[in-house]
Image: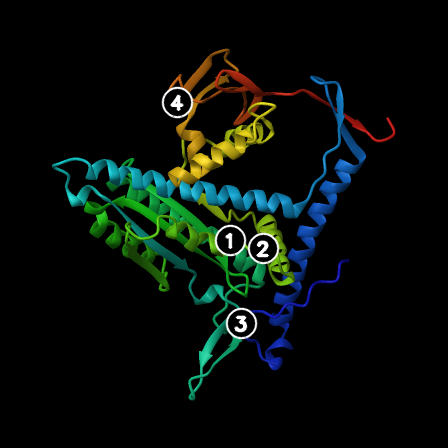
């Protein structure tokens, strides 16, 4: 067993409290989640160590390495890209409306920050202010669960249900004119709470605010926030506000420990730390196009790679690369059903910079990727490869 890093929590627990059974349970749970994250990485590395892959298209053998830190950084980047893309989409909607002579302010999108915090019975500890104004922590006599892990799991399920009920009812007012970005954060005691940002037309504000109060009161959520924010301030302020809760810097042992711990907690309790409104470009297809861009050189004598060229354009336009690809993509998706019928969907202009053709086969509720081709200005830059797995010693 790996020796856990000694990290002091942000919340101050007295020495007396640290001797209690409940505090020791919390400490052991943190170490268990930390160890779970390490264990998952080790299993992945061992699998790749003993198994190799032969690319049947190129007839070359490929060894794949796995690094949790690298994968985490990729995940963090995609979270940023999706969140920034949604804010840019909303900004464009407002810009389009403002260009009209007879626009109404009530048709402009507004931005609202909201928080949902679980009631007292979900928290194993609580903060108390004594007579001299100082805060201290004690066990919560109202804690209703046998274990902290039960409170984490059931608390997350409750928060998710509240958000889903609220979001579905909001859509009754807004129809398609609704976007969201949602992040799950945990307290020092590992109990989750939800932060989210909603974007909707100003004319719906009063109804949605009242709906928020109605839903949260029904579920007895007393600690909550519903605050409007200016759309004219920093474009990505909403995203940065949320992302800081789920994306940690890996340049110190404190953040490495915390991020590992949260990774284990999310895996064990099936917590989705980040979600947002669906965009036309899915994460899976974005990853394949981005990888193709990363490995493609424009010309042998060019001083820029395709990725550098695109990033330069993104900087000039102040947009994320996720949205740049979506803006400049013609995507054709074909789904083969068991009945033999093919369903074809597409978006974008056929004259777009990038063209992608993805073919899926539906197996039950799952969609298996059968084939894909990605082109840049009519030049094929990536296609599906076929691999043969082999085990060391074969």
* Quadrant, the C terminus: top right
Q: Residue furthest top?
A: 340
Tell which circle, 2 or 3, labels the residue nearer the N-terminal end: 3
Name the secondary structure under disc 2: helix
Label 2 neighbourhood size at 10 Å, few (<14), some (14-19), many (20+)?
A: many
Are the two marked residues, 1 and 2, in contact with CB atoms closer than 8 angstroms? yes
Is 145 in front, or is 205? 205
Q: Nearer the N terminus, badge 1 or badge 4?
A: 1
Mark toward the start of the polypeptide (1 vs 2): 1
* Residue 129 at least partly seen: yes
Local secondary structure at mark 3: loop
Q: Which residue is mark 3?
A: 11
In this view, the residue in front, 219 or 335, is 335
Instruction: State the image coordinates of residue 105 (x, y, percent, origin top left).
Output: 17, 45
Work out whether residue 372 can be spotted. no
Q: Residue at x 58, y 59 (%)?
A: 149
- Give the structural element (helix, strand or loop) at label 1: helix
What x and y, as percent, mark residue 333? 47, 20
**C-alpha separation, residue under disc 1 versus residue under disc 4:** 32 Å
**Badge 3: few (under 14), some or many (20 or more) residues near its Cα, within 10 Å?**
few
- Tag 1 residue: 246
Residue 12 x/y as whole percent: 55, 75
Q: Nearer the viewer, residue 30 or 228?
A: 228
Image depth: mark 3 or mark 1 in front: 1
Residue neighbourhood size for the residue with mark 1, other residues' Cα within 10 Å, grouped as few (<14), some (14–19), many (≥20)? some
Label 4 belongs to which residue?
347
* Image height of 9 relative to 58, above or below: below
Q: Quadrant of the N terminus?
A: bottom right
Residue at the spot of label 2: 262
């Amino acid at each position: 067993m790996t020796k856990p890093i000694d990290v002091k929590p942000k919340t101050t627990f007295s020495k007396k409290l640290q001797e209690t059974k409940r505090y020791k349970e919390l400490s052991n749970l943190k170490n268990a989640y930390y160890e779970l994250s390490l264990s998952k990485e080790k299993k992945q590395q061992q699998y790749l160590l003993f198994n190799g892959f032969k690319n049947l298209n190129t007839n070359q053998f490929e060894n794949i390495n796995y690094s949790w830190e690298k994968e985490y950084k990729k995940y963090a980047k995609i979270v940023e890209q999706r969140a920034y893309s949604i804010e840019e989409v909303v900004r464009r909607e407002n810009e389009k409306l403002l260009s009209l002579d007879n626009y109404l302010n009530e048709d402009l999108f507004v931005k609202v920050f909201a928080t949902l915090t679980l009631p007292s019975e979900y928290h194993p500890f609580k903060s108390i202010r004594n007579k001299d104004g100082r805060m201290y922590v004690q066990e919560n006599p109202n804690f209703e669960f046998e274990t902290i892990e039960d409170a984490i799991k059931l608390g997350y399920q409750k928060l998710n249900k509240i958000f889903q009920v609220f979001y579905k009812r909001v859509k009754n007012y807004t129809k398609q004119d609704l976007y969201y970005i949602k992040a799950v954060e945990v307290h020092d005691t590992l109990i989750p709470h939800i932060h989210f940002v909603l974007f909707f037309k100003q004319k719906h504000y009063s109804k949605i605010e009242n709906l928020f109060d109605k839903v949260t009161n029904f579920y007895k959520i007393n600690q909550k926030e519903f605050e409007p924010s200016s759309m004219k301030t920093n474009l990505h302020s909403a995203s940065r506000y949320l992302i800081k809760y789920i994306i940690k810097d890996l340049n110190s042992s404190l953040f490495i420990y915390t991020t590992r711990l949260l990774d284990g907690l999310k895996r064990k309790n099936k917590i989705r730390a980040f979600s947002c409104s669906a965009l036309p470009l899915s994460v899976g297809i974005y990853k394949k196009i981005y990888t193709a861009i990363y490995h493609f050189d424009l010309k042998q004598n060019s001083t820029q790679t395709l990725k550098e060229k695109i990033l330069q354009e993104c900087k000039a336009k102040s947009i994320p690369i996720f949205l740049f690809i979506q803006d400049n993509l013609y995507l054709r998706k074909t789904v083969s059903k068991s009945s033999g019928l093919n369903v074809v969907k597409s978006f974008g202009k056929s004259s777009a910079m990038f063209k992608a053709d993805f073919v899926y086969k539906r197996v039950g509720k799952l969609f298996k990727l059968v084939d894909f081709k990605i082109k840049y200005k009519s030049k094929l830059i990536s296609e599906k490869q076929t691999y043969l797995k082999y085990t060391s010693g074969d």
